[in-house]
Image (cartoon, rainbow, N blue to C red):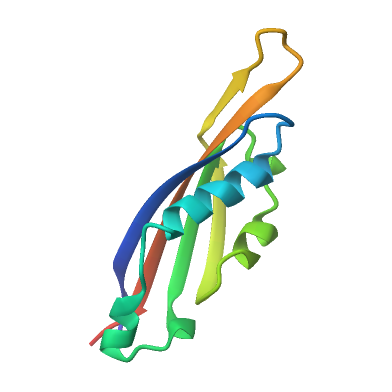
């Protein structure tokens, strides 16, 4: 049986001061998951631990995201995290600071008959 994507949510997050890519990524994921409710799982009597959760994060400097922290922030399912080039860096006019904007896509897949 192939897992079917049943949920896809998007979110954005930022770190306005400090240039912390992980903080922006975590905020983007939280934004995305707060748009969803997993009532479907209860309705279908599917254990939340059986969900496959696929997270894609887009930031300008993917190597600066702690993917394990992002993975650990999700409360249910078997989580995988992929970090890619995307998002946006907005430099300060004085050049001493950068606002980091991250994008997140959170997909949930379930094994369905």
Residue 50 found in image quarter: bottom left
Q: Could you say where residue 17 lies in the image, as x and y percent from the top left?
A: 70, 29
* Residue 94, placed above or below residue 102: above
Left of 6 or right of it: where is 28? Answer: right
Left of 52 or right of it: where is 109? Answer: left
Q: Residue furthest top?
A: 94
Q: Could you say where residue 89 lies in the image, as x and y percent from the top left?
A: 59, 25
Q: Which residue occupies 56% across, 48% down?
A: 27
* Residue 61, placed above or below residue 25: above
Q: Residue furthest bottom?
A: 45
* Residue 24, placed above or below residue 9: above
Q: Quadrant of the N terminus?
A: bottom left
Q: Is residue 5 visible?
A: yes
5, 7: nearer the viewer: 7
Q: Is residue 2 visible?
A: no
Q: Which residue occupies 66% across, 40% down?
A: 21
* Residue 98, placed above or below residue 49: above
Q: Which residue occupies 54% across, 65% down?
A: 80
Q: Which residue occupies 31% across, 67% down?
A: 5
Left of 19 or right of it: where is 28? Answer: left
Residue 90 found in image quarter: top right
Q: Could you say where residue 20 lies in the image, as x and y percent from the top left?
A: 71, 38
Q: Could you say where residue 26 lies in the image, as x and y percent from the top left?
A: 60, 51
């Amino acid at each position: 049986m192939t897992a079917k994507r049943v949920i896809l949510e998007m979110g954005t997050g930022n770190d306005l001061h400090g240039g912390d890519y992980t903080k922006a990524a975590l905020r983007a994921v939280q934004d995305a998951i707060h748009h969803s409710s997993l009532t479907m799982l209860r309705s279908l009597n599917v254990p939340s631990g059986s969900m496959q959760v696929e997270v894609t994060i887009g930031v300008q400097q993917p190597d600066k995201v702690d993917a394990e922290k992002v993975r650990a922030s999700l409360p249910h399912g078997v989580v995988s995290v992929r970090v890619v080039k995307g998002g946006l860096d907005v430099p300060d006019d004085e050049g001493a600071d950068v606002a980091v904007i991250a994008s997140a896509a959170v997909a949930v897949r379930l094994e369905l008959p």
